[in-house]
Amino acid sequence: MHRMDMRSREQYLKALLGRYLRARKRGKSALLDEYCRNTGMARKSVLRKIAGLLKGESPPRKQRQPVYGRPVRVVLETLWEIFDRPCGQRLEPLVEEELERLRSLGELKVDEKTARQLQRVSSATIDRLLTAKKTEWIAQRRYGRAGGNLIAKKIPLKMTDWDLRQVGFLEMDLVLHCGASTAGEYAHSLSALEIGSAW
């Protein structure tokens, strides 16, 4: 069912307010039911809004206390780096499967309360909690120190003008699946392309 946005709900409530004030008790109840059904709002919230309109001001919105604090965010940032910076949807199952193993190996120091919270955090919340870290990482990539790796610059690479009459010229790419640290065990991928045959 389509839900109205906040502005539309307020306009709708103001349009109903005159009828609501003129109605008897049963009529008021029916108007409230209609409004709640069409907007998806809770009855108590609507009554608070009506009281605020009658006072000439919008009722203050309740400030929700954050469910996940700094300890959860810090651990998520560490896990995000370990697993090579995946999105929240990919990180969520990794947290569920790997958190206890990483704790037992001493890779992560996480108290029980934080561990329980991490096991139930949603992918959308993970993305929200990692927003600042992702922004910082993107900025570092975009505006980081220029010049690149000095050792890599000394390795001669032939990028073009291959002699395609001969077989055996390869382009190779090695990937280390280790996240931000090369400590411990991890997988390697090596892909090779023969230039002449593209195989």
Image: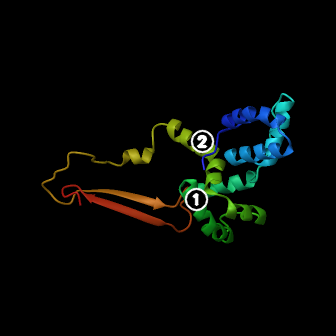
Tell me which residue sits at (66%, 35%) in the image. 8
Residue kind at label 1, given as amino acid type: Leu
Q: Is residue 63 visible?
A: no
Locate residue 104, reporting x and y percent: 68, 72
User: Nearest the camera: 146 or 105?
Assistant: 105
- Left or right of residue 83: residue 148: left
Q: Secondary structure at mark 2?
A: helix
Colour treatment of the image: rainbow
**Identity of the residue drawn at 85% across and 36% down:** 51
Residue 54: quarter of image: top right
Estimate how packed mark 1 is, as few (under 14), some (14 to 19) or many (20 or more) residues with alpha carbons within 10 Å.
many
Residue 7, picture quadrant: top right
Decide if residue 125 is on the left or right side of residue 176: right
Give the structural element (helix, strand or loop) at label 1. helix
Q: Which residue is mark 1?
A: 91
The image shows residue 158, relative to residue 50, as above or below, that is below
Q: Quadrant of residue 101?
A: bottom right
**Mark 2 residue crowding within 10 angstroms, few (<14) / some (14–19) / many (20+):** few
Who's the residue at 72% across and 34% down the image?
10
Q: Is residue 187 above or below residue 77?
A: below
Q: Residue furthest top?
A: 56
Name the residue carrying label 2. 136
Left or right: residue 48 versus residue 5 is right
Q: Which of label 2 and label 1 is nearer to you? A: 1
Q: CA distance from mark 2 to mark 1?
A: 19 Å
Question: Residue 27: where, in percent of width, then height?
Answer: 80, 43
* x 31%, y 48%: residue: 157
